[in-house]
Amino acid sequence: MAACPYWARRFNWSAPEVPVEEVNPNQHYLGNRARKTGVVEKCTFCIHRTRQGRLPACAEACPTGARVFGNLLDPDSEIRWVLANKRIFRLKEDLKTEPRFWYFTD
Amino acid sequence: VHLKPFALSALESATNGGPRYHVWMGSLTAIMLLGGYAYSVQLRQGLGVTGMSDHVSWGLYISNFTFLVGLAAAAMMLVLPAYVLHDVDFSRAVLMAEAVAVAALVMCLSFVVVDIGNPLAGWHLMPIIGHLNWPRSLLAWDVIVLNGYLVLNLTIPFYILYSRYAGRTPDKRKYLPLMYLTVMWAVSIHLVTAFLLAGLPARPFWNTALLGPRFLASAFTAGPAFVIVLLWFIRRETRYEIADGAFSKLALITTVAAQINLVMLISELFYKFYSPTHHGINARYLFLGLGEHHALVPWIWTAIALNVVATGVLMIHPLRHNPHVLMPACVTLFVAIWIEKGMGLVIPGFIPSPLGEIVEYVPTWVELCVTAGIWALGLFVLTILVRVALPIELGDARSPYLEHPPAARAVRPRATRARYEEIRPVRRR
């Protein structure tokens, strides 16, 4: 929380509540489920969009194509091509948590 | 083994006292209960009842934590002159300093626990059942150094007091190596805590090489200042004699450290304000305020004024040797460092945020009550430790077994015991 410069981490200071009129009913069952009090919320990669074959909102909005999202199980997908052909790394790989989030450079 | 009478006599010294003692302990208990109630509110409703937010995610709790780590470290640094320089009139101060270190650590650990959103997840830190991410995580280092320091500061006084209680002279070969280790450990707890803050490149206010040394300098000011007041109180209220030399040496340490701290403050101000860059904006918020946002400005200038006045007074020799000036000066310095190393250090690191938003922070009643409760807990622990140590140090509390050995236990040979004694007789007193 204190280290993140982007204000990307949100902490559940109290029991999370969304006003009824602001609830987006167009959601996946596993997406945007509020977590409990006292923990940090995390990204679901917009599961409600990706299960319909669409990109996560951040990847769709990105004007430079810096973000690549795709199905790792599909050998013909763009993400597999990036992982096979670009210079890539993962954060704290040695912890063996197998994060499905890679950074690549051109 | 004198453990049982030792525990009983410790309990007796801690629970008996005059009416003033009971009023003191009773008031502390009342404040602790109030803090406990406030903490129960926080546990039920979450950290949202505090003034903290996603922008300012460290508040009054962590501010007190950083200050108290310094107090714990500095109290123990007094050991250095007493044992390394063989300064005898200083050594009586050391046990009290260790009691201060233990009390400060109890407060530190409590402040960390109340700042955790989900304290029940604490078992994740324990090796084997959880995973302590050591040596990569700086927080894991902090857990280790703080708990190790607490163990060291409990072990050494226990050994010394227990030996005296049992009528033996404490063996220097046993506790001196531990003492040396503790002194070095004291530096480490404060440096590691400073590195926790200094290691965040997104927070330029803390991201400076001066932070660690400045932590040490301010700790050496506040720690001895607190010990001076405590020793002065003990000397006034009990028969425990503390030589004037101890006071003048402690006062000298405090004064020199306060001077170094001011020099570092000046160099920090020069660095931030002479050729200001965007990274100095947090310091601007702290010292001058940004537009209508200036919650911390009166705080920090109060601290600087108190610091300068108290340091100036202590630099004049006749004033420093006069207890009627020394005591208020020490209290003033203590308060000044508490502001400077607490709210004055932690909060401005978050304001404005790296993206430029300004969200100010004001503690709520829950935070104030919990904080008061933890301070009461620390003073409670300190009082008990001093109350237990004093009669043993004065020679009033001695094991009853020294005059009347517990005969019943010695003449009851069990089968295994008898066989063992045939090989190597057990030596009895």
Image: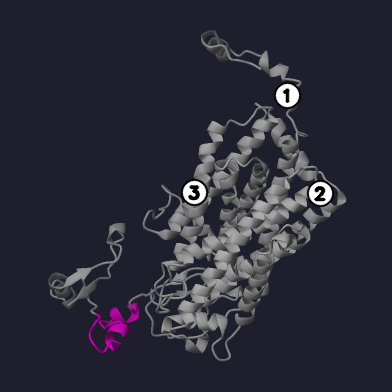
Q: Are marks 1 and 2 in contact (CB under 8 Å)?
A: no
> Does any portion of residue B38 appear in the rendered image?
no
Quarter location, residue B390:
top right
Q: Secondary structure at mark 1?
A: helix
Residue name at image x 37 percent, y 75 percent: A43
Q: Tell which circle, 3 or 2, labels the residue nearer the N-terminal end.
A: 3
Q: Secondary structure at mark 2?
A: helix
x and y percent of residue B386 in the render?
A: 71, 46
In this view, the residue in front, B266 or B162, is B266
Residues at marks 1 and 3, CA–CA distance in whole angstroms: 38 Å
Q: Secondary structure at mark 3?
A: helix
In the rendered structure, which amino acid carries the disc numbered 3? Met
**Residue pointed to by mark 3:** B184
What span is in magenta? A46-67
Could you tell whether B328 is left or right of B138 in the image? right
Could you tell whether B379 is left or right of B280 in the image? right
x and y percent of residue B85 in the render?
A: 56, 43
